[in-house]
Image (cartoon, rainbow, N blue to C red):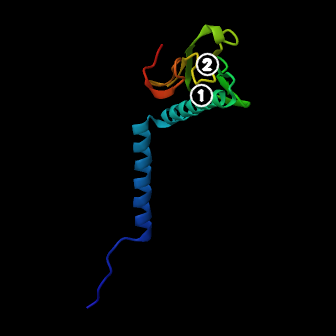
Amino acid sequence: MRYQARGVSLLEMLLVIALLAAISVMAAAALTGGFAGMQLRSEAKQITAQLRYTRTQAIATGKPQRFTIDPQQRVWTAPGNRRGEIPEKLGVRFIGAREVQPRRGEGAIVFFPDGASTGGRVQLSAKQAAMNIDVTWLTGEVRLRRGEVER
């Protein structure tokens, strides 16, 4: 009697692995809002980190420090010559104290040596999703949370 080995070939196995990988990528993109959602969260985390850095610099240096954002030009600046651009696909809104605006249309949040700030909100949006970066005026705390798209 002759026995034949039964099983799967290497090619069949690789095909199944490739299909599972493709399905996983599509499922992850659908659950996280796709590329625009990932870009939104990434940029929101970047701006949150820069606001926290600005607050830390104010406390460390004992001098007020300023974070600025220009929604029309889609750029932000922080102490230490830190700069960034916000991708075209994301909507940008700023709400803050007019008294510290460097120029019309540009927003700023000033942090003081005691950790307090002038407060404000940066909202980034993509499609139907939004992320709010809130800075409280009394404590200077910077918080990132999901928000509603404001129109």
The amino acid type, in three-letter code, at marker 2 is Ile
Which residue is identified by label 1? 51
Could you tell me which secondary element the residue under label 1 belongs to?
helix
Measured from the top left, where is residue 33 in percent x and y? 44, 34
Measured from the top left, where is residue 42 in percent x and y? 54, 35
Q: Along the line of sight, which residue is nearer the eye, 57 or 85?
A: 57
Residue at 65% across, 12% down: 100
Q: Is residue 57 above or below residue 122?
A: below
Check residue 111 in the rendering and tell me which mark sits there, or answer none. Answer: none
Q: Earlier in the sequence, mark 2 or mark 1?
A: 1
The amino acid type, in three-letter code, at marker 1 is Leu
Could you tell me which secondary element the residue under label 2 belongs to?
strand
Position of residue 147 in the picture relative to residue 61 (left or right)? left
Which quadrant of the figure has residue 72?
Answer: top right
Which quadrant of the figure has residue 56?
Answer: top right
Q: Which quadrant is the N terminus positioned in? A: bottom left
Give the class, few, some or many, for how many residues have Cα within 10 Å of label 2's Cα (few <14, many ≥20): many
Measured from the top left, where is residue 63 in percent x and y? 69, 23
Q: In the displayed image of the protein, which residue is found farthest to the bottom?
A: 1
Residue at 29% across, 89% down: 2
Which quadrant of the figure has residue 16?
Answer: bottom left
Residue at 54% across, 23% down: 140
Position of residue 104 in the picture relative to residue 136 (left or right)? right
Check residue 109 in the rendering and tell me which mark sits there, or answer none. Answer: 2
| Residues at circles 2 and 1 in contact by the CB criterion of under 8 Å | yes
Q: In the displayed image of the protein, which residue is found farthest to the right?
A: 81
The Cα–Cα distance between marks 2 and 1, rounded to whole angstroms, is 8 Å
Give the class, few, some or many, for how many residues have Cα within 10 Å of label 1's Cα (few <14, many ≥20): many
Measured from the top left, where is residue 35 in percent x and y? 51, 36
How many dots with numbers? 2
